[in-house]
Amino acid sequence: MKIKEGKYSVKDRIFIYYMLFFSLLAIVEIVSNIFYGLKFFYNYKWIMTFISSSLLMCLSLKSKNTKLLKRIGIYFGAFAIIPMAWIDSPGIQSSSILYSFLILIMINYLLVGIERIILTFLYTGENLSIIFLYLKHPDFFKPLTIKQQNLDWMISIPTIFFFTSILLITFERAYERERRKNESTSIILKKKSQTDYLTGLFNREHLSENWPRLLNLHRRRNDSISLIMFDIDFFKNYNDHYGHPMGDKCLVSFAHILESNTEREFDFAYRLGGEEFLIILGQTNKRGAVNVAKKIMKALENTAIPHEYSSVDKIVTATAGITTFVVGENEKSCEVLINEADQALYNGKNNGRNRIVCYSEEAYINSLK
């Protein structure tokens, strides 16, 4: 019988498997007892086991709340079926101890908290009491011939081993599903923490974590890395006159342009805040960075987002500042490089906007005078 995973919880499925197992086991034991000519009173415990287990299994398959059914099954099995199985057998010479272990697993998996602890102690005490009773009064238990005992063990051991394997497989699959689910959730949460909520571009947290890895990737070959910082021209005017919802749409549109131009595995697009954006281009020198910046500026121009309140044009434009360095030769911290790109951007804004400016030490020194 296959139980749908989505419809029943792991604990529900384990309980149903238990009830199914005991129902089938009871049938096997009754048939074998009759076949080997045992007296009928040996079947009373198995008839009771079959009726109770089958009923609880059917109710569990139809019920949405199985907490009460689990408790009934556990308590009935622990304090009715197992003691009866011990007494109605040759005591510790029988396979009843194996079924006791199965009930113990059910107690500790299906119950929680103080109830589980108390029931475990009570159940352990019950089994010890039965063993003590056997040691003191073995005649209290029903004897079986050597042949009958061997038959009992030959049926019980493979049956219990098979069922235990099913339990372990169920536990393992449930654990693996939970592990994958947690791993997927962790990845999603990490991605959310490292991306801008509006544009979906990476944020500063991702930049801090990714920068050392990016340097190591390019250090082996002394590659150039370029940073391009963008600022949408007169974006405050755009927001003030078109409204923040339209301003958000404008930012998202520009973010899409940046994403379409940073598709290589070592290219990354970031929103630093407000209308400021940054792209990092691996294996890219100054000329390559200028070409990428031109493509982005052209794509923004082709998008033709109206901007009647810009002093540059009647559509949305942007200014870009570029800095480039060779990894392994003139390495600088990420903060310093961002400041250099920002200074180039500042110079571009001071010289009319809607243009691309590359950073130079001389221009930076002059700007400080």
Image (tube, grey):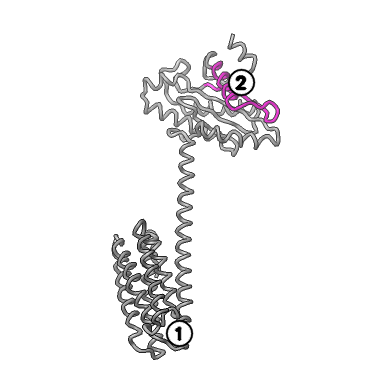
The image's mark for residue 269 is none
Q: Tell me the residue at 45%/74% (across/down).
A: 160
Residue 8 seen in the current view: no
Disc 1 on helix, strand or loop?
helix
Question: Magenta residues?
Answer: 319-348
CA separation, marks 2 and 1?
Answer: 91 Å
Q: Residue 254, how many percent across, how many down?
A: 48, 29
| Viewer-proximal residue among 206 and 71 | 71
Q: Among all residues in the image, which is located at the extreme bottom?
A: 37
Q: Is residue 37 above or below residue 212?
A: below
Image marks 2 and 1: residues in contact by CB distance under 8 Å = no
Identity of the amino acid at label 1?
Gln
Q: Is residue 193 above or below residue 129?
A: above
Q: Tell me the residue at 41%/17% (across/down).
A: 309
Mark nearest the camera among 2 and 1 is 1
Q: Residue 140, how many percent across, how many down?
A: 36, 83
Q: Among all residues in the image, which is located at the extreme front?
A: 136
Q: Is disc 1 surrounded by few (<14), some (14 to 19) or many (20+) residues within 10 Å?
A: some
Quadrant showing the C terminus: top right
Residue behind mark 1: 149
Disc 2 on helix, strand or loop?
strand
| Viewer-proximal residue among 20 and 360 | 20
State which tag comes first along the sequence, 2 or 1: 1
The image's mark for residue 358 is 2
Q: Tell me the residue at 48%/40% (across/down).
A: 191
Q: Is residue 265 above or below residue 238?
A: below
Q: Is disc 2 surrounded by few (<14), some (14 to 19) or many (20+) residues within 10 Å?
A: many
328 falls in the magenta region:
yes
Say whether residue 128 is left or right of residue 355.
left
Q: Residue 234, how many percent across, how many down?
A: 45, 19
Q: Residue 56, how many percent across, how many down?
A: 31, 69
